[in-house]
Amino acid sequence: MQNLMTLVSFPGEPVPRLISVALLVLWGLYKRRYKLTAWFAASNISTIVLVDLLLKNLIAIPRPLGSLEWGYSFPSGHTASYVVFWGTLIFWIRTSNKSKFIKDAVYILGTILILLVGYSRVYLGEHRPIDVLGGYIIGIIILCVSIFIGSRSKLLK
């Protein structure tokens, strides 16, 4: 179980997270979906800035005893970033001309990973349940604001 939870959490670490966003940005540029790509990048980068650089340092709650990670605990950056990353990717794929199978597969995979990452962070001892709940709430707020702004500004058309 430990290995599975580590595997689930790994993409939320800073370097894999940035690499994932960068690869999808490059893909979007290659596909010439410039507005959608800019929206995707801005949504994900704003999550990193708001959660990892601003909120964690502003709230400054220490991690649980025994945690192997540095930095503060609340809110869970992994959880917030999974909500925004997978939420924006699901939205992006849903607006594409991909097959129903691809759209459904991304939706199911994203949903499973969003749900599992919160559990994995508590299981691994890196967060308390309240940190994960905070990450989900903040991630959902960022995602909703991002979709609202993208829709209003016609970035998502």
Image (cartoon, grey):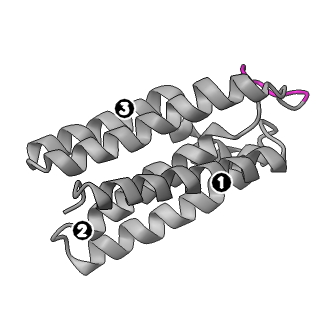
* Amino acid at dot 3: Ile
* Amino acid at dot 1: Tyr
Per the rendered image, the range of residues in magenta is 65-71
Q: Nearer the viewer, residue 28 or 45?
A: 45
Tag on residue 95?
2
**Quarter of the rendering occupied by the C terminus:** bottom left
Residue annotated with mark 3 = 19
Q: Main secondary structure of the magenta part?
A: loop
- Picture coordinates of residue 45, whole percent (x, y): 42, 34
Number of labels in the image equals 3
Q: Earlier in the sequence, mark 1 or mark 3?
A: 3
Are the residues tagged 1 and 3 within 8 Å (C-beta)? no
Q: Earlier in the sequence, mark 1 or mark 2?
A: 2
Residue annotated with mark 1 = 136
* Amino acid at dot 2: Thr
**Residue 94 image-quadrant placement:** bottom left
